Structures are given as C-alpha cells and as structure tokens.
Image (spheres, rainbow, N blue to C red):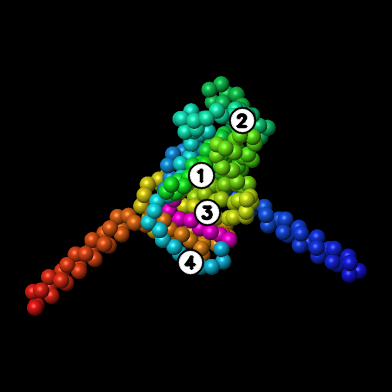
Amino acid sequence: MRSLTFIFALYISLGYAHNVNFCPNLNAVHDFDEESLLGVWYIREYIFHKENETKTEYNPYCPIIQIRKFEDYVNGGLVNRNLPTPPTPYPTLTNMPYVNHQYGLQEQYRIRHFVLEWHEGLWQDDYHIKVNTSHKGFWPTDVPTGTVDKMYRFFGGVIQVLKVANNHLVLNFCMRLPHSQLYSVVLSRNENQLTPEDLASIHNVFTMKHLSTSALKRVCENSATNIKHSSFLFIFLLFLYRRSLFES
C-alpha cells in the first residue's frame, strides 16, 4: 500500500513539474492587422512575472524592437551570406478560410514569417517567429535547423500579443529553452509617448490575466521630463545663490 501511495505521489509531482514547463495560454488578442506591427518600437517597461520580490528599477537607455517581414529582412541586405531556402512564406492550412473579395472565392489562412530584432546598445538578438493569420496574436518560435541558427537566435517558447493600440504594444515572452522565463515588455511607437493613463490601462491587462507586476523595470526615463526637472532645479539654485549674495 505504501509503495502504491509513493508511486501515486511521484506521478503527481512529476506531472506537475512537467506541466509548469508549458507556456500558459494568455488569450492573446487576434483582431488586428499584423502589418500594423511592423517597424520600430521603443521598450518602456519590462515586467518579470516570475520574480517574487517587489522592486521598480529605472534606466535612462532606450532599447528598441524592430519587427520585419522575413523577406524584407533577407532582401534588405541585413544578412550578407548564402541563406538557406526559407519555408514557403504562405502555405495553406486547413483552418477556417478567408474570403477572396476580388473573386468571391475562399482563401485559406496562411503562415507568415517575421523577424523580431531586439536592440539594446551594442547587443542585438534576432528571433524568427511564425504568425498564423487565424491566430495573429500567438507567435510560436521556430526550432533551429542546419545553418539557420547562424542567421538568428532562437528560443523554445512562444510570444503572445496582449494588447495592440495606435501608440503602444504589449508582448509576453514565455521561454522554455534554454531556461524557463516569463516576462512582458511594454512598447511605444515613439519615445516618451505613453501617459500614466496608458500605463494604468496596460497594467490592468496584466491584472486580468493574473500576471504579477511587482518586479518592474522602466527604461528610457532620461527624456524631456527629467530635463525639465533638472532645468527647474538649476534655476531654483541660481535664484537662491543670487539672493544670498544680495542679502550679504
């Protein structure tokens, strides 16, 4: 009886350990035009959902993410070596079809291949992602094969689009390989574009999805706000200095 209990407990523990390695379904948004996400985005916040400690860090540097079509990434001369033939850009699937408005014919959903370039100072990583036009907000990452891994870096996991707006974008990264990570990044189209109301709305999305926001890192903070504060402080100190000279 004890042996059966031990085996059952071991089975449960192993099953739990196996399940925690899977990326959670965060009900990503899908009602957007994937073309609208192309281009440069400025990272404003990192939120580390698995960290238990409560902390808020600030950093003046402005990392960026650029999303490109795979064909633009290759044809734009960004990769100056012989490339392997990429997968067929638009293979047909058996999912529910679109309607071809020109001929009134049904058109199958497609897989599109994008490259996400992550720039932080001198450091850069490129990720190859697949976008199914039937589930636009759920981006599984490719597994490296042959010489492909020399072109861009891969990680085992998925990127989910949690929020899309004209001036901001929220992406969640769930990495299973090389080690488990779960974090989100808040992006804006321009530096210093997000208002406190925007950030409050974004953090409400994390709350509804039961994602912790206690470990937060804000970047790109050395903008006009800090300059205004510094200018005001300088003028105030200059006023005090001149006043002291006058009184003496």
Query: Closer to us: mark 2 or mark 3?
Result: 2
Mark 3 or mark 2, which is nearer the start of the sequence?
Answer: 2
Residue type pointed to by label 4: Lys
Q: Residue 104: percent from the left, percent from the top?
A: 57, 23
Name the secondary structure under disc 2. Answer: loop
Name the secondary structure under disc 3. Answer: strand
Q: Are marks 4 and 2 in contact (CB under 8 Å)?
A: no
Prevalent SS, magenta region: strand
Residue in front for this viewpoint, 201 or 124:
124
Q: Residue 214: percent from the left, percent from the top?
A: 51, 64
**Residue behind mark 2:** 87
Query: Closer to us: mark 3 or mark 1?
Result: 1
Mark 1 or mark 4, which is nearer the start of the sequence?
Answer: 4
| Magenta span | 43-50
**Residue behind mark 4:** 55
Residue 110 colored in magenta in the image: no
**Marks 4 and 2, Cα distance to the nearest angstrom?**
43 Å
Residue type pointed to by label 2: Pro
